[in-house]
Each structure stands twice: as C-alpha cells, then as structure tokens.
Image: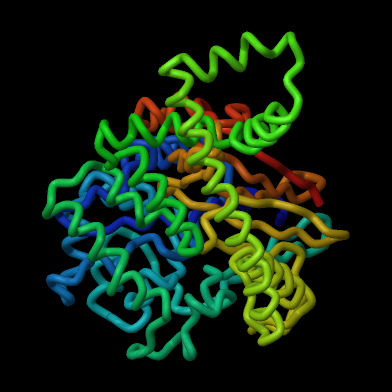
Amino acid sequence: MLPNSKPSKIIVISDLHIGGDPDIEDFKCTNEFIEFIDYLLKNEQQYNLELIINGDFLDLWKCQEEKDEKIKIIINKNKNLFNKLKEFGAKHKITLIPGNHDHEILYNKKFQEELEEYNIHIDPSQFFKREFLIKNKKFTAIGEHGNQVEPASSFSDFYLPTDSSLSYHVSMLFTYKVMRLGIKKKRPHWVQEIDNIDTDLLPYWFLSKYFYNEIGPILKSFLVPMLILFSLALPYFIFDIVTDYYQPKFLLSVLNFLDTNLLMKGLVFILYFDMVIVILLLFVSLLRKDFQKRLREYGIQSLSEILISKQRSYEEKAHEVLDGKNPYNKKADLYITGHTHAAELHKQENHIFADTGSWKQLTKRIPGYFRLPSIFYPYYLLSYLVVYEQPDNITVELRAWPKSYTPNLTILEKIFIKRRKYVPLPVLEDTLLKSYSC
C-alpha cells in the first residue's frame, strides 16, 4: 500500500452459470447477487476495489438457438442484474476471466463489446495476477478458472476457437437434453436438478429421484416396509434356524404368535424375501470387488479413486503455480481457482490455496435410514473470496452471502433422511467461513 493511497481489495467469485434458455430458470440467486453488489457499493468506498469473476459467469452452452445473440439473450433475461453490474463498474473495476462454459467470449469480439457496455472487462488470459504491497513486501495472488486442471473439462489449446472439452459434449448430448425433456413432458422440478449433480453420482441420483418421486403408491407401499425390514433379515434368518432345534419355554408364546398371526406371517414372508436379496447382494459385492481388482491391474480407476486423483490434481497444480511454474515465471503466495463448485481455503506453510465455490444450487448426498436410497439434499453456499490490504498484513477471507432457501423434498425424504446434523443449514447473514493473515 502506497502512502496516502487507498488500500487495495479484490473480491473474487466464480461459477454463477447464468444462462439464457427461456424455459429453464438456471440462475436462482438474482436478488441475492444484486444485494451483494449493493453492499459492495455502499460499504467498500475506502478501498481501491476490483471485482474478479473467475470463470463460468455465463453458461453459453445452454444458448444454442441464436449463436450470435447469446450474450444479448442472457442480458435481456437478466436485465436488472447487468444494470447493477454496470452501476458498480462505473465506480470500480470488473474483470471477467472466461471459463469452460463461457469460453466463446475469448475469441468473439461481439460478445466482448456487449459485455463492455455493462463495464465488464474481459481478460483473455488463462491466468490473472494481482500484487499487494505491505511494508515494502509484495504479496502475489495468481488465479485461473481451473478447468484446465481437470482432463474432462480441459481444452487441448485454451485459445483455440474450434476446440471443445469432453464435458461440453456430455452436457450437450445428455445433460441438457434431459433437462429439456423434463420441460416438454412437464415433469416435476427434480429433472432440472441433473445440471447440479456430479457425473459420478448420476446413477445414485437417478435411483433416489425415481424411488422418492416417481414410484407409484402401491409399489412404494410394498418397497418401503421391505427395505425397512431389510436390516432384520439376517438376524431373523439366524433366529429361525436356531429355534428349529432349540425352543426355550420363554420363547414358545412368541413363536406361536409368529406362526398364527396373519400380519406376522406377512412380515416373515418379507423377511425371507429380503434374505434372498441379502444373499444375492453378497455375491454381487464379491463380484464387484474382484472386478475392481482386475480394473486396477489394467490401470483403470474406480469412481472414488477418480475423485481422489482429481483432488490431488488441483493440489499439485496449486503447488506448481505457487512455486513459479506459471506464465509469469514468478512465485506466488496465493493460488485462486474455481470450477469445482467446492468452496475451500487452506494454508500450507507460507502458501494459501483458495477455491471460490459457486453461486449455483449445490447438492449433498445424505444416507437414508433403513437402507433406503440416499437423499440428495439441495442447498446454496454463495461463497466469495476477499483479499485486502491492512496496515500490517494481507488478509484472505472466504465468506458466504446469505440466501434463505427451503428445499422441496417429498414426505418420505423428510422422514427417512439420516444424519440430520450433516444437513447443510441456510446462511442467513454475511458469514466468515475461514480466514488467514500474512
């Protein structure tokens, strides 16, 4: 910070995924975002402030009807939001770093000019760098959207207009078609949530939504008791075998009741049916373990291993960038990324790693009681990163903007959701999630 100058502050957000499809309400935080910008306008006058949107601000993949009018369509659909950004941009700088969902902005001059009209300045680089000065010591922050770290979302050449990623083709051929199918068939709200589900969790999500939302009441009235009694199947099977050879007197009345009561006969039938399933699942489990072993021998990872390797890829990339392997050939103190939608801030030695999270709807998989399918619990965490100068140090904060939200769950989901303490609570005020000072 120079003498007699305002201290510097950057606000970094990412992954809003604002689209222009007229049939899909893809961005559900318009009011919160406008309130957020209003807050910055009113409370940050003492800083030399910059808002950095670190990729996937827009979701151009969802605009396929008018390819040359994508930005105009999105702006017209979200006029109040863009007018508020224009007001903010008249006083403070707004920088947009394109991500994989708005990659077209990099090479489309028309798109860039339309955004410039709202004071949104495009940085065509894959990386951005910001420096802060405290007591003659520089603090360097380097960031990127982060899609280039993940193979499925990376471009062979980030600056090549004709290039596209694997995730683009998956989204266009599958995800968005399912979303539009839900609109045409007038299916309930849950179909459009597919856009918020990680690819590796899609089979479990489909099973969950089919069970809780689509199965008819007659079939469900049979399946629910069967699954509830599932955990009792093996103990009862052992009990039945033992009592065939040994029947103590204190159990005679119980055994007689089980043999004569019609309701209990029905429950016993379900327990035996469950026992058959238990045996089948045991063989399936053994087969699955052997199959995974063979896959590993051929160098093919399981889903859980893919997730772990994905996390390691970001950690390795962070260390490379912080150690100077970046376009600036300069060591950094802070590495900022987005793309994963998982807000994170942690420190290792003198280096800080930050993921700005997302303003999209997120989903948490929570187990169901009695071996019922998992519940996919929707929630929001409107996270943003703040880096600013203070008289004696640089402070890095991960914060969350408030959004009140009540998920639309079925009655069965509300009853059988397990581990309620892990259910994400709504953020009701501007909240500090984590911070470091350097």
Residue 44 in sight here: no
Residue 97 place in picture, x, y as percent: 46, 69
Instruction: Please report the residue visible at 36 percent of the width from the left and 70 percent of the height from the top.
Output: 102
In this view, 65 is above or below 209 = below
Q: Quarter-wise, where is residue 21 in the image?
A: bottom left
Q: Residue furthest front?
A: 245
Q: Which quadrant is home to the N terminus?
A: bottom right
Q: Nearer the viewer, residue 204 or 1?
A: 204
Q: Nearer the viewer, residue 165 or 66?
A: 165
Q: Quarter-wise, where is residue 420 in the image?
A: top right
Residue 252 place in picture, x, y as percent: 66, 12
Q: Is residue 115 left or right of residue 91?
A: left
Residue 404 place in picture, x, y as percent: 42, 28
In this view, 271 is above or below 306 = above
Q: How many marks?
A: 0
Instruction: Please report the residue visible at 46 percent of the width from the left and 14 percent of the height from the top.
Output: 261
In this view, 81 is above or below 252 = below
Q: Nearer the viewer, residue 300 or 432?
A: 300
Q: Nearer the viewer, residue 326 or 270?
A: 270
Residue 373 in sight here: yes
Q: Is residue 351 left or right of residue 157?
A: right
Q: Is residue 269 left or right of residue 76?
A: right
In this view, 43 is above or below 131 = above
Q: How is the image coloured?
A: rainbow
Residue 30 place in picture, x, y as percent: 32, 42
Instruction: Please report the residue visible at 42 percent of the width from the left and 51 percent of the height from the top.
Output: 205
